[in-house]
Amino acid sequence: MADNLPDKLPGHTRSANERTSERNAGFLVEALLLLAFLIVALAIFVQLFSQASRAGAHSAEVNRAVLLASNVAEQFASNPTTVSAETTSEGLTASCTVNPRATERGTLYQANIVVTNEEGETVYSLQSANYQGGGAR
């Protein structure tokens, strides 16, 4: 709006330096607003990428825990009496508790498999059962 004014008003004359300083002030304000916007946007993106990284690490840990629990469950399914009480792999520990229950015609083995991380937090748990016949028919 100031640029639309004529160079000479009654009682006032504007020099070329005044016009240049007004343009520079406008440019400076625009540049500062753009810089503030970029800083806010950058802060938001850093937080988003940080959360995505944590979610990815947690997902990878859960996937490893599921694989370890599945391996222990397969051992339990093949022979419930010889499954290891604890199995460790890649910083995770799978604990397997087997409870046998005798029936008339065999034994029902129930297993509770719990996978924990290095901090002792439960990452994944699984329950399984295996019936071994062998009683009178």
Image (cartoon, rainbow, N blue to C red):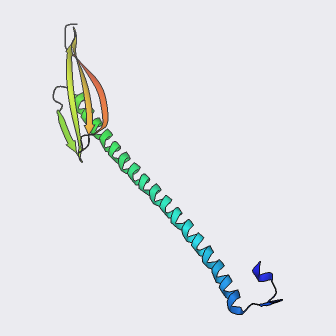
Work out whether 56 lies above or below 7.
above
Q: Residue 86 appears at what percent x and percent y? A: 18, 36
Residue farthest to the right, as pictured: 10
Q: Residue 10 appears at what percent x and percent y? A: 84, 89
For this view, does 118 lie left or right of residue 61? left
Picture residue at 30% right of the left edge, 33% below the top: 125
Work out whether 108 lies above or below 104.
below
Picture residue at 19% right of the left edge, 10% below the top: 135
Work out whether 22 lies above or below 96.
below
Picture residue at 76% right of the left edge, 80% below the top: 2
State which quarter of the image contains the N terminus. Answer: bottom right
Work out whether 84 lies above or below 35.
above
Quadrant assignment, res 79: top left
Picture residue at 59% right of the left edge, 70% below the top: 33
Quadrant assignment, res 107: top left
Quadrant assignment, res 113: top left
For this view, does 91 lie left or right of residue 50? left
Residue farthest to the front, as pictured: 11
Q: Nearer the viewer, residue 40 or 18?
A: 18
Q: Is residue 79 visible?
A: no
Q: Residue 58 appears at what percent x and percent y? A: 36, 47
Q: Is residue 98 visible?
A: yes
State which quarter of the image contains the C terminus. Answer: top left
- Label tally: 0
